[in-house]
Image: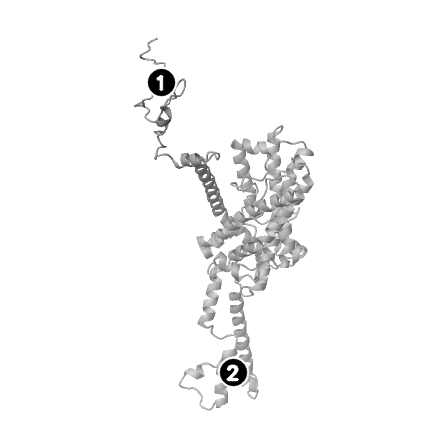
Amino acid sequence: MDKDRFPLTASREPNPLRPYYIPPSIGPTSATSPPQAAHTPRPAPTSSLSSSARDYLPDIDIDLRSTTGEAWTHTRALLDTLVWRYTSILLAQPFDVAKTVLQLSLPPSAASLSTPVKSRKSAGRTSAGRHSHGASRASHLGSESDSEGSSERSDDDMPDYFTSAAPRSRSPRRRKRAPHHSDNSPSRTPTPKDRREQDSYADYKLRLTKPDSITHAISTIYTTSGAVGLWRATNCTFVYSVLLRTADSFIRGLLLALVGLPDIAGPDPGGLGPSLSVTGAGFSGLDVSESPNPIGSLIVAGMASCITGLLLAPLDLVRTRLIASPISHAPRGLVQNLRQLPSLVVPSVLWLPTALYYSVPQIFSAASPLILRRQLRITPELTPSLWSVAAFTTSLTDLFIRLPLETLVRRAQLSVLRRHDPDLPTVFEPAEYKGVGGTIYSILYAEGETTTKDSKGMLRTRRGQGMAGLVRGWRVGFWGLVGVWGGGALGPGESHKQRGEF
C-alpha cells in the first residue's frame, strides 16, 4: 500500500474541496485539539428557513416546503371544485328556471278563465261603450221628458261641444255634469300612466301554451326577458347549493357523533350527483350498508337533511322570488332580498313541505344501496352490470319522488312571498297553494284540462292535469340521468364502483 496516497492519520488541515469539514482524529486526543475547536465554522448564512427552524427547534420536525405545497394543493382542489360547481349551475340554470316557472304557473285553460289585466280592461271599455251607446239610443227614441234619458243623450251627442252650431240653451248644471259623468264612465281614454303599466305588463308576462314543455318555456322566457332572464338567480343558486352540501355534511357528522355511530361516506363533492339536483336536496350517494346500525344511520341522514333545509329555507325563498319576479323588479341582490324578508326563520307554512322535500328523497337514496346489497344480493363487485342498471333505476325513481315534493315547496314559497308583499309582480299567472293535500288534489283534478283519446278515437276532456302536473320537467331530468349514466358506463369509474356509490 502506498502510504503517501493513503496516510494512516488524517490531516487536520482543511480540505480545499470541503472547506467546512473537519475529519475526526484517530487515537487519543491531543492537547492542542481544544483550541482548534474554537475555529469550528458557523452554519452558512444562506441556509433556508426550514433548516434554520430545524436548528433552533431540533425536537420538532418542520418542513415548510412540503407544508406549503400541501396547502396550495388543497386550495387548488377547492377552487377547482367551486369553478366546476358554478359552471355546472350556469349550464343547468335555464332548464331549472323553466321548470320552476312551469311548477308555479297555472295551465293555459285555467289561466284563460281569469283574463289578463290588459284584456280585461279593453273588454270592459268595449262592453261599457256598447252599453252606453245602446242606452243613449233607447233614450233618444223614448220620451224626451225622461231626465236620465236626456242626460245620456247630451253625453252621447259629442259633436255639439265642438261645432259652431252648438245649442246655447243648455243650463250650467248640465255643462258641469257632462264632463263629470264622462270622467267616471268606463269608456274614458286611458291615461299615460295606465298605458305604461299595460305596456310593461305585456313586456314581461309569459304566454305559456304548452305547460309540459321545458323548451317552450325557455323560448317564451327568452322572447320576453332575453338571455338575462334565462340565467336569473344564478349567483343565489350557486351560494345555496354550496351551503346546502356543506351544512348537510357538517350536521350529519355532528348528529352521528352524538349518537355514537360512524360517519357515512358521502358523494363526490365535485360532481353533479346522479339526480342532477344542483339546486335541490341532491345528496344521493350515501351508503349505510356498512354501518353497524343502518336504521339509525338512515334516521340521522334524514334528520340532517331536514334541519339543513329548514335552516337554509330563507335563501331558497329569495331564489324563488328572483325567478318568479321580472328582472326589472328591484332589488335583485341576494343581501337586499334577505333584508326584505320579515324574518330569517322559516314561516310555519313551509315547515311540512320543506321537511318532506328534504328528508324523503334523502332517506330513499340512502336506503337503496342497503336494500340492493342485503335483500337482493346485488353488489358492484359480483354483478357490476346489474348494479349499474339498478343505480340508474333508483336514481330515476328518486327523480319522480323529488319533483312532486319540489312543486309543493315552490308553491308554498310563492304564497308566502305574495302574502308578505301583495304587490309582488310575477312573470306568469301564479297557481294557488292550498296545503299539501289540497294542492295535490287541485293539480290532479281541478287545474287545467287534460284531453285524451278513447278506444274509439274520440277526444275526451277532463278537469285536472293528472300526474303530469306533479312531475313538471321530468324529461330534462331523465335525459340528464341518461347522460351521466352513459358517461359513467363508458368511462373507467372504478373508484365509484368499489365504493358502491350511486
Mark 2 crowd level (few <14, some 14–19, many ≥20, 10 Å Cα) = many
Q: Which of 400 and 377 is in front in this view?
A: 377
Q: In this view, does 239 lie above or below 55?
A: below
Q: Residue 225's spot in the image, x, y percent?
A: 46, 56
Q: Which corner quadrant of the image does residue 128 belong to?
A: bottom right
The residue under label 1 is 10
Mark 1 crowd level (few <14, some 14–19, many ≥20, 10 Å Cα) = few
Q: Is residue 491 above or below residue 167?
A: above
Helix, strand or loop at mark 1 = loop
The three-letter code of the residue at mark 1 reads Ala
Q: Which residue lies furthest to the top in this view?
A: 1
Quarter of the picture holding the N terminus = top left
Q: Residue 54's spot in the image, x, y percent?
A: 44, 34
Q: Residue furthest front?
A: 31
Identify the mark at residue 474; answer none if there is no mark.
none
Helix, strand or loop at mark 2 = helix
Identify the mark at residue 153; answer none if there is no mark.
2
